[in-house]
């Protein structure tokens, strides 16, 4: 019974992800080799907030450890304690990746860490209401802390969502909280710039890849951010 394949719902982009016992099987993306190295590095430095890479199965799928908990299907409102835990976990993840990039001769120093690049709450496993691990490393790549933080702040605070209707002043307070929890050497104004930059990138990606709904959402969020944050 333990090798029954149970489809995992909730992901938005990768079809046919299944659970098999205490593992997850995932069709590898083109970046698979980098993701394997990254997950092995995170394990080697003792970072527990990511799945372990356990090899490849007979069908060529990645085998990852299954992390027990809940993964939100949608964005939404999160209380302060949760925002703080998420920002701290992102900080730990970033810090754990520094050693992977090393300081190879000729490597651009601006690529200071590995970005996850999709730090939405929908890619975090929660336990007892608190985010304890990141999943879905398909888009991970060398980058900067701000690139990841801008995107994470946008989605964790759900900036620009009129359905949850959080007042601009409250969103500004939540942003300060989120940034401070990551680490006080990062300025709120630099994160604001990064948020707008990520919103512009996603708008362009939606336009260029013919995903109008995504482009429209990102464009709306950018307007909201420029006006209110
Ligand atoms: N290592 C894991 N541990 C627990 N659940 C996982 C794991 N990997 C994926 N999942 C579950 O599978 C769903 C889809 O996985 P994800 O990697 O986020 O794919 P997608 O690219 O479609 O977003 C997640 O929402 C989560 O519920
Ligand atoms: Mg996902």
Image: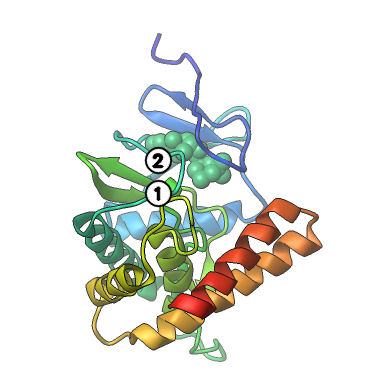
Task: Identify which residue, 170 or 10, lies in the foreground.
Answer: 170
Q: Quadrant of the image for the C terminus?
A: bottom left
Looking at the rendered image, the disc whose residue lies closer to the viewer, 1 or 2, is: 1
Q: Secondary structure at mark 1?
A: loop
> Picture quarter containing residue 64?
top left
Total of numbered circles in the picture?
A: 2
Q: Secondary structure at mark 2?
A: loop
Q: Residue at x 59, y 51 (%)?
A: 32
> Is 229 positioned to the left or the right of 69 in the image?
right
| Mark 1 sits near ligand 1, with its Cβ under 8 Å away | no
Q: Residue at x 43, y 58 (%)?
A: 158
Query: Residue 221, how many percent across, how many down?
Result: 56, 66
* Circle 1 residue: 76
> Is 23 positioned to the left or the right of 48 in the image?
right
> Picture quarter containing residue 128?
top left
Q: Residues within 10 Å of mark 1 (few under 14, many from 20)?
A: some
Is there any visible trace of residue 64 in the rendered image?
no
Asked if residue 147 is positioned above or below residue 62 in the image, the reply reads below
Query: Residue 14, how many percent across, how many down?
Result: 61, 40
Query: Residue 125, how many percent across, how many down?
Result: 34, 43
| Mark 2 sits near ligand 1, with its Cβ under 8 Å away | no
- Mark identifier at residue 228: none
* Circle 2 residue: 72
> Is 70 positioned to the left or the right of 74 in the image?
left
Asked if residue 93 is positioned above or below residue 15 in the image, the reply reads below
Mark 1 to mark 2: distance in Å? 9 Å
Task: Identify which residue, 138 or 216, lies in the foreground.
Answer: 216
Is there any visible trace of residue 34 in the rendered image?
yes
Colouring chosen for the image of the structure: rainbow
Q: Are marks 1 and 2 in contact (CB under 8 Å)?
A: yes
Q: Residue at x 53, y 79 (%)?
A: 226
């Amino acid at each position: 019974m333990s090798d029954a394949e149970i489809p995992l719902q909730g992901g938005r982009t990768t079809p046919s992800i299944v659970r098999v016992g205490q593992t997850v099987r995932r069709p590898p993306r083109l970046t698979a080799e980098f993701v394997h190295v990254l997950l092995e590095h995170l394990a080697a430095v003792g970072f527990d907030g990511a799945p372990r890479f356990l090899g490849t199965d007979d069908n060529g799928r990645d085998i990852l450890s299954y992390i027990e908990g809940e993964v939100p299907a949608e964005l939404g409102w999160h209380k302060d304690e949760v925002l703080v835990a998420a920002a701290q976990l992102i900080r730990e993840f970033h810090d754990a990746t520094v050693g992977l990039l090393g300081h190879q001769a000729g490597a651009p120093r601006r690529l200071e860490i590995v970005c996850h690049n999709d730090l939405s709450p929908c890619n975090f496993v929660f336990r007892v209401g608190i985010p304890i691990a990141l999943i879905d490393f398909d888009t991970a790549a060398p980058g900067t802390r701000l690139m990841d933080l801008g995107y994470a702040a946008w989605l964790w605070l759900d900036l620009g969502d009129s359905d949850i209707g959080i007042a601009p002043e409250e969103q500004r307070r939540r942003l300060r909280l989120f940034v401070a929890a990551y680490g006080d050497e990062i300025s709120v104004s630099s994160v604001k710039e990064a948020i707008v930059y990520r919103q512009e990138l996603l708008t362009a990606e939606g336009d260029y890849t013919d995903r109008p709904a995504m482009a429209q959402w990102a464009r709306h969020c950018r307007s909201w951010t420029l006006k209110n944050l």
